[in-house]
Image (spheres, rainbow, N blue to C red):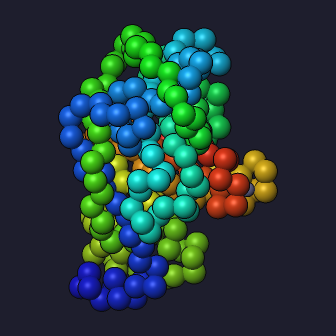
Amino acid sequence: MSENVLKKIAHLKRSTWLPQVEEGDGDLADSKFAGKPWLNKGEQWPKCPLCSKPIQFFLQLNLETLPEETRGRVGTGILQMFYCLNCEPDCCEVLADAWEPFAKSELIQVIQPKEQAEVIEIPEFRNPFPPKRIVGWKQEDDYPDYDDLTDMGVKLELEEFGFIEDDYPRQGDKLGGYPFWVQSPEYPNCPVCQKRMELVFQIDSEKNLPNMWGDMGVGHITQCPDHKTQLAFGWACH
Ligand SMILES: [Zn+2]
Ligand SMILES: [Zn+2]
């Protein structure tokens, strides 16, 4: 049954890439979860503008080493995501806005590495993450969720979608593909041109990072297709 449904939406098939990881930090410029980010010589570990404490480092993608199909799409340089767990609400109902894209307690940026890096110790965090180096990418097929399909003008019966919903969109950490929305689609709009931002990377709860977004939520790094420096991170949970 699922094959019939996938045939109907075959034109929307996208590739997604699952990070293959090894324990340990690797080089400063490597793609990685946690560990030490690349900081250009003279720079300091970024601080959270809300609480002024060092902001926790989640993810770094060296854009030159991504799978060929995605290389260049996100831009060039090194993409970094920092997110302040000090300013994180314990529950979705309190302290609004940490999960919203463009929250002040997050820093998503693409930097251009200069010749020399600054090497500094990792600050102490309440919940330190063991570093994992991304050593490869496993390609998989991906398809949109029900609401995204509807927005794209594809009308599936809920029963039909039921045949594929356990598999698509893919859960877990992944590069590209379609977002797995815990609630409903929440694409941010680019602050410059208002265009809908697109998924760059999905960070699930308790996968490569021992971190839970609320109650088993899922987070998404998104980017404006035209303004590569406009990046956001948002998450939602049950
Ligand atoms: Zn903070
Ligand atoms: Zn834009």
Residue 64: percent from left, percent from top: 47, 53
**Image vertical order of residue 45 relative to residue 236, above or below:** above
Res 119 → quadrant: top left
Res 13 → quadrant: bottom left
78, 176: nearer the viewer: 78
Residue 4: percent from left, percent from top: 30, 89
22, 127: nearer the viewer: 22
Residue 126: percent from left, percent from top: 37, 13
Horizontal side of residue 93 vs 13, given as left or right:
right
Q: Quadrant of the C terminus?
A: top left
53, 150: nearer the viewer: 53
Outermost residue toward the right in this view: 192
Taking the spot 42% from the left edge, 37% from the top edge, the residue there is 29
Taking the spot 33% from the left edge, 71% from the top edge, the residue there is 141
Residue 22 visible in the shown view = yes
Taking the spot 34% from the left edge, 83% from the top edge, the residue there is 6
Q: Quadrant of the N terminus?
A: bottom left
| Number of marks in picture | 0
Residue 196 visible in the shown view = no
**Image vertical order of residue 225 relative to residue 108, above or below:** below
**Image vertical order of residue 146 relative to residue 136, above or below:** below
Taking the spot 28% from the left edge, 53% from the top edge, the residue there is 136
